[in-house]
Amino acid sequence: MTTKAWKVVSALVVVLVLFGLVAAAQPYPVTVTDDRGRAIKIEQQPNRVVVAGIPLYTEIVIDLGAVDRLIAVAKSPDNPPQVAKLPSVGPSFSPNVEVIISLKPDLVLGAGDWGGVRGKLESAGITVLTTPLIGGIPDIFSTIRTVGIALGLKEQADALIGHIAEKIVTIETTTLAEKPVRAAFLYASAPDTSPYAAGSGAIENELLLRAGGVNVFRDVQGFPQVSLEEIVSRDPKVIFTDPSQIENITANPLLKTVSAIKNGRVYGINAAWVTSTNVAEVLKQMGEFLHPKK
């Protein structure tokens, strides 16, 4: 294993220690911290759970073995098949407050402040837990642990975090031994508009690095819209985007000179999987695209 790979292993071990992977009994009530930094007290084990946010919450509940506690989820094409028959509370960016209240949940996961949704639910006496935005793999671990504690499944959450981290370390022992490839992660919603590039602080940037790539937009912060001329100038050898947006990039005549497009190296990565409990599988796939076997 290379020195760089050992550093990655050590970093992940530190993360796991910080998340306290020693199983312990968890009596109620429990208190967790939400995305506002507020303490959310949960008096007893939630058994009627509604997911009003992104599919990550649904995946976590399922992976923790608590799918039977889910009574409804936000509508999304990326929802796991296990919840296909559950009622919908509307899209995650605009869940239906009246429908959620009518279901009488004892915990709602992922309801934000758009349109006052969270405030309305809390005013109705419903416990709402929304975790911070995902900016990196440690944030996924943090969300898993927070949801696990809320559900009374801390031990299972710790095991899930360890399982994902172990897969990531295994993948990185291979990808980080390869010569880094200049790459970009772009989102282009239409063929005639400038795309958005994942920069520093985005989980896509972290995945590019861990997969053995060098992000050509690592010097920018967040998800800025970048000009087509800038993409041409930085000339990534590989471009990742959501599968539904590949043609928006490859069919743009102003990008035809970019190496990734000329050489057919524009690859689809499901955007929802980037922030999911399947993040290790995403990392593996990106590593294989960046460093194809000869």
Image: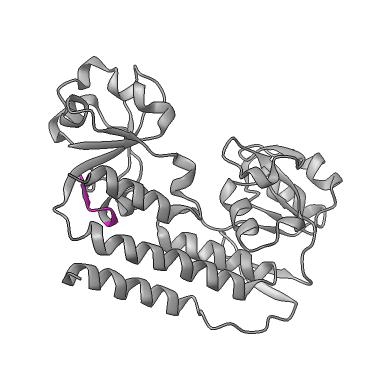
Among the 4 quarters of the image, the one containing residue 35: bottom right
User: Residue 286 in magenta?
Assistant: no
| Observer-nearest of 153 and 194 | 153
* Along the viewing direction, whichever of 122 and 174 lies nearer the viewer: 174
In the picture shown, does residue 249 fall above or below 23?
above
Left or right of residue 273: residue 177: left
Residue found at the far front of this picture: 294
Give, as a single range, the part of the protein colored magenta.
Answer: 210-215
Q: Residue at x 86, y 45 (%)?
A: 102
Position of 97 with respect to 176 (left or right) is right
Q: Is residue 218 left or right of residue 286?
A: left
Q: Is residue 94 visible?
A: yes
Image quadrant containing the C terminus:
top left
Examine the image and state in which quarter residue 225 appears: top left
Q: Which residue: 67% across, 62% down?
A: 65
Q: Position of residue 49 (x, y in %)?
A: 75, 55
The answer to whether residue 202 of the structure is visible from this angle is no
**Residue 174: x %, y % from top left:** 24, 60
Placement of 51 over or under 247, stated as above or below: below
Image location (x, y in percent) of residue 14: 37, 77
Does residue 292 lie above or below 4 as drawn? above
